[in-house]
Image: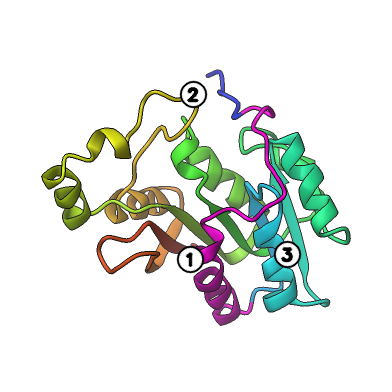
Amino acid sequence: MNKVSSGNDYVHGVTAPLTSQFLHEPIGQIMQNIQAKKVLDIGCGNGHLAKYLKINIIHSDGVIVGMDPSESGIENAQLLLPDAKFYCMGVYDNPCKIEENNFDAVVSTEVVEHLFYPRELLRFAKAKLKPGGYILLTTPYHGYLKNLVLSIFNKWDNHHWALWDGGHIKFWSKKTLSDLLNVEGFEFKEFVGCGRVPYLWKSMLLVGKLR
């Protein structure tokens, strides 16, 4: 099977993504709860989440490693967090290219919806996690009430805007993403709605523990 690369042509600027306003804090809280000190950020973009976690959660005695297929993202991430290690690669690459192993946690924010083969993200994470390690996944939220509101106000075309290059390939619910976790060897542990009002959340955060 030929894997479809997410490419290195996605251009990242230096500003923090809008999602940082409602994702960083709940991710940080969970990292604190599970006492993660060694973290791999898959799809780290320009490094703002990695920096947030390094400064606020894992501190100087912890390890943060980032990876992203975007060359501009990695360049900006390295400038933002010079002491961390970043790899220019994606989830379809060989996990052995990352020298570090036995991570306490893997985090991947707003990545899984862009993948033709989302199982590869979880398999990559499994290859780098320690036994019993955690994965934190975020993706745009879809649920009954939000879908109903979109339908009532005829917003589906705007929500699933097709007239742009790239973008989202798959749209996940709590059930489908937790099913993916289960199939790939993770025990679903926690769901957190992020951004906006309850049940109209912008994104959702699911936590799995490697069985």
State whether residue 125 is above or below residue 50: above
- For this view, does 73 lie left or right of residue 189? right
The quarter holding residue 6 reads: top right
The total of numbered circles placed on residues is 3
3D distance between C-alphas at marks 3 and 1: 16 Å
The quarter holding residue 84 reads: bottom right
Going 38% across and 48% down the picture, which residue do you hit? 180
- For this view, does 52 lie left or right of residue 201? right
Magenta residues (range): 7-35
State whether residue 28 is above or below residue 117: below
Q: Which residue is mark 2?
A: 165
Q: Which residue is mark 3?
A: 51
Alpha-carbon neighbours of circle 2 within 10 Å: few (<14), some, or many (≥20)?
Answer: few
Q: Is residue 161 visible?
A: yes
Residue positioned most to the top? 2
Q: Nearer the viewer, residue 30 or 145?
A: 145
Q: Between tags 3 and 2, which lies in front?
A: 2
Residue positioned most to the left? 152
Q: Which residue is mark 1?
A: 22
Going 27% across and 60% down the picture, which residue do you hit? 200
3D distance between C-alphas at marks 1 and 2: 26 Å
Amino acid at circle 3: Lys
Spot occupied by residue 127 in the image (x, y as percentages of width and height): 64, 49
Amino acid at circle 2: Asp
Q: Secondary structure at mark 2?
A: loop
Q: Secondary structure at mark 3?
A: helix
Q: Earlier in the sequence, mark 1 or mark 2?
A: 1
Q: Nearer the viewer, residue 126 or 30?
A: 30
Q: Earlier in the sequence, mark 3 or mark 1?
A: 1
